[in-house]
Amino acid sequence: TYVADIFLAQSWRDHRLRLPENMTEEYRILDVEWLHNIWRPDCFFKNAKKVTFHEMSVPNHYLWLYHDKTLLYMAKLTLVLSCAMKFETYPHDTQICSMMIES
């Protein structure tokens, strides 16, 4: 296994959304609780053994809504991923490990 700290960004457009009537700015930062009430891509890490969302004094993930109904979700994650490593040439070995994301 190996560990990776990443900043995941997902962007999608949902024309079914209704913009707030008072939205005059180019984008609005929404409370991440909105994620429970709207459709979003169901991405997952196929070779993950463990995924941890970073929590500081407040959750470390964000959701933006743009005028064209594009949503941008960003989250800081720590992943523990599986990787079949080969050590036959250790200490001169090189490992190639993938991060497999699917939806």
Image (cartoon, rainbow, N blue to C red):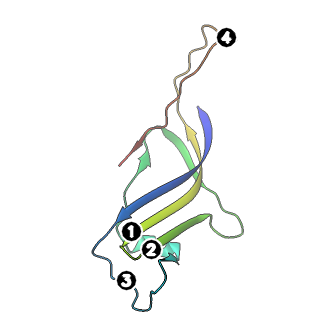
Q: Quadrant of residue 86?
A: top right
Q: Residues within 10 Å of mark 2 (few under 14, many from 20)?
A: many
Q: Quadrant of residue 88?
A: top right
Q: Position of residue 34 (x, y in %)?
A: 45, 75
In contact (CB < 8 Å): disc 2 and disc 3: yes
Q: Residues within 10 Å of mark 1 (few under 14, many from 20)?
A: some
Look at discs 1 and 4 and give the one toward the viewer: 1
Q: CA distance from mark 3 to mark 1?
A: 11 Å
Q: Is tag 2's residue or tag 1's residue first in the polypeptide sequence?
A: 2
Q: CA distance from mark 3 to mark 4?
A: 57 Å
In contact (CB < 8 Å): disc 2 and disc 1: yes
Type of the residue with mark 3: Leu
Toward the viewer: 52 or 98?
A: 98
In the rendered image, which residue does mark 4 sit on? Answer: 92
In the rendered image, which residue does mark 1 sit on? Answer: 70
In contact (CB < 8 Å): disc 3 and disc 4: no
Q: Is residue 15 above or below residue 96?
A: below
Q: CA distance from mark 2 to mark 3?
A: 9 Å
Toward the viewer: 42 or 6?
A: 6
Residue at image location 58% in from the left, 21% down from the top:
95
Residue at image location 55% in from the left, 45% down from the top:
50
Q: CA distance from mark 1 to mark 4?
A: 47 Å
Residue at image location 37% in from the left, 56% down from the top:
42
Q: Residues within 10 Å of mark 4 (few under 14, many from 20)?
A: few
Q: Is tag 2's residue or tag 4's residue first in the polypeptide sequence?
A: 2
In the rendered image, which residue does mark 3 sit on? Answer: 19
Q: Position of residue 25 (x, y in %)?
A: 49, 82
Type of the residue with mark 1: Thr
Q: Is residue 6 above or below residue 85?
A: below
Q: Is tag 1's residue or tag 4's residue first in the polypeptide sequence?
A: 1
Secondary structure of the residue carrying numbered label 1: strand
